[in-house]
Image (cartoon, rainbow, N blue to C red):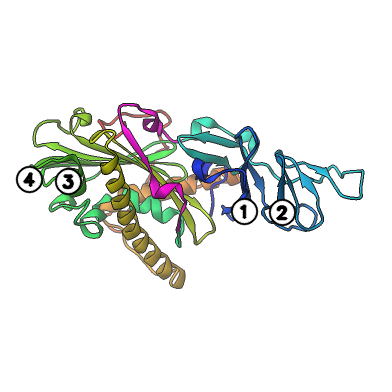
Amino acid sequence: MFLRNYWYVGAYAAEIGEKPLARTLLGEPVLLYRTADGRAVALEDRCCHRNLPLSMGAREGDAIRCGYHGLKFDSAGRCIEIPGQAQIPPDAKVRAYPVIERWNFIWLWMGDPAKRDEALLPGWQCIDDPSLTTTMGNGCQALPMKCNWELNNDNLLDLMHVVYVHPGTLGGAGLDNNPVTTLRLENSVRMMRWSANVEPVPLLAKLAGFNGTVSDRWQATTCELPSHCTIDAGFAEAGKVGRDGDWDQGVRLRALITATPETEMTSFMFYAQCRNFALGNEEVSKRFIQQIRAIFDQDIAVMEGQQRVNSMLPNAPTVEIRCDVPVVAMHRLVLQAAAKERGEPITVTRVDPTTPRAMQPVPSPVTQPIEVGPASR
């Protein structure tokens, strides 16, 4: 299942140049390249004559010539030349996807162009904040994952996993004993965990040069439809900031992560990080990029393991536990969005994890943003 009427990252901006790049997105073949003036273009990667991928053809100026029978297409997807034929059929064209280049990413609108809405881009303005240092992920190369895209949402809304999957870098004793607050909005789900008097985040403490052993920590994730997650995580000296205080007074990291579906069983991860410590320090940035990639390799191993079992046992029963509340809320938000795209109503219920299978009606989604301390920043 894919949500179509949303923006997806098709590539890092640095991946796109004059040479065409072929990529499958939401089960569709897409061709990405830049025109002579640097504008990013996304076309359906097929010739409308005999379906040869246009990426197997050749650039001619800002146009693409098919490598089979020579049909030539402009950057809007219109056929502008057919060898040996003066008349061009009106249906000789391929789809051109709306494109926005922003925050070092190439965003594609994969649905109805008439419903294109820039307001549905995620709130990743921190990349432009000159008071922060931003590092782009994985050398600005898409990170392939052999798993369904929604597993990445699950992983990032369930940050209890850091205790067990990333104990030496992001974990710490006692985090899993603290409750999670969940907020459901119209197009997003937000979770936050505040942990007082615990060990600082090991990786961040090391890179920031923090030598203390006790801190107050926060973990907050905002997941915006369809799959754009902002993790706000960090720590401060115990008692210095407070749950609803100014987290910028501590060591703060914002990780911006999205999963773009390739197929139902595979996807691409794109990510960046914005930090408020070791500003402009290239050595710290280099180490940070390496460490974060290693952390994501651990996450991907977990998600790909889940996908293998999900594929073999699609009907295997599972149970929800307390930390699943934001994950379940996001699943239902995605289902509602899919039903809306199909023009179908959907009834959604909430499961209370403390009383398995106890069902209560879910209220209508909140239509206006609600501030809940720093978790909603």
What's the residue type where badge 1 is placed?
Glu
Query: Between marks 3 and 2, how big is the CA–CA gap?
Result: 50 Å
For mark 3, give the secondary structure: helix
- Among the 4 quarters of the image, the one containing residue 251: top left
Instruction: Tell me the CA gap for discs 2 and 1.
Output: 18 Å
Q: CA distance from mark 4 to mark 1?
A: 50 Å
Q: Is residue 96 magenta?
A: no
Is any part of residue 279 visible from this angle?
yes
Residue position marked by numbered label 4 in the rendering: 213
Specify few, some or many for label 1: CA neighbours under 10 Å numbering under 14, 14-19, or 20 or more.
Answer: some
Distance Cα–Cα, label 3 vs label 4: 12 Å
Residue range highlighted in magenta: 122-144
Measure how far apart labels 1 and 3 are at the Cα level: 43 Å
Residue type (three-letter) at the residue carrying disc 2: Gly
Numbered circle sitting on residue 28:
1
Distance, label 2 to label 4, CA atoms, is 59 Å
Judging by the rendered image, the residue that carries numbered circle 2 is 57
Q: Residues within 10 Å of mark 4 (few under 14, many from 20)?
A: few
On the rendered structure, is 157 left or right of 146?
left
Mark toward the start of the polypeptide (4 vs 1): 1
Dot placed on the residue nearer the N-terminal end, 2 or 4: 2
| Nearer-N-terminus badge (2/1) | 1
Mark 3 sits on what residue?
Answer: 206
Foreground label between 3 and 4: 3
Q: Position of residue 322 (x, y in %)?
A: 25, 53
Residue 343 placement, left or right of 297:
right
In the displayed structure, would residue 375 be above or below residue 328?
A: above
Element under label 4? loop
